[in-house]
Amino acid sequence: MPIITHKLPDYQPNPDTQILILGTFTPDVAGAPDFFYGRPRNFLWHLLPQAYGLAPLKDEPLASKQAFMARYKIDFADVIKSLDLPAGLEAEAEDDAADGYVSEWNNVIAIVDALPHLQAVYFTRKTFNGLPNIKAQIMPLAQHCRQKGIRFCKLETPARHYSDTKLQQWKDTIVAQTTCLRP
């Protein structure tokens, strides 16, 4: 089975990060995006800036996204470091397919502990349906965050579609901090 590694295997969030957006996996395959949440059917770079009242950055260069990240002290990490997918499924990096084929997990607790200014972690998954292995990685992280006084919430995934309802949930959860989907 071919090992599919993370597109950014050595990426470390900025130590000044206050908000960590945690996803599942960014594959290093042909046609993969150059940065987190860059797939064509992912709308994080549309939703996140709009949650702060700014124009979408979905089609903007990476430097514009990084400037936004620095301004709002937001950074990214993924739970999965590599997948061991059966031959022919190399392009299948969707969560439900990936969950059963993880070769290596990222140590997300160590990532959190390396961020001295961290105030919140937002996992971009509303449910764990069909994802027992990802759930087993996230639940200890959520508990660890609670013990450290770090806000931990789930967000509706930015993938597949954009909607005003999804945008409102992101605004309420990240910016206003009036809602929080708990794991």
Image (cartoon, rainbow, N blue to C red):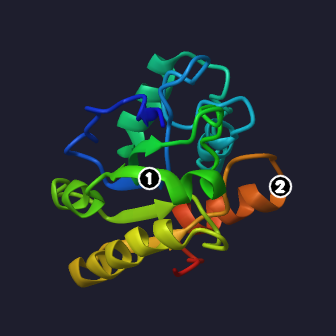
On screen, residue 12 versus residue 127, left or right, reads left
* Residue drawn at 55 percent across, 15 percent down: 61
| Corner quadrant of residue 32 | top right
x and y percentages locating residue 39 in the rendered image: 65, 31
Q: Amino acid at mark 2?
A: Asp
**Eyeballing the image, is 166 above or below 172?**
above
Q: Is residue 99 above or below residue 162?
A: below
Residue 78 in sight in this render: no
Q: Secondary structure at mark 1?
A: strand
Depth check: 147 or 33 in front?
Answer: 33
Residue that appears at 25% across and 60% down: 112
The secondary element bearing badge 2 is classed as helix
The residue that label 1 is drawn on is 102
Decide if residue 23 is on the left or right side of residue 181.
Answer: left
Q: Which residue is mark 2?
A: 164
Question: Label 1 amino acid?
Answer: Val
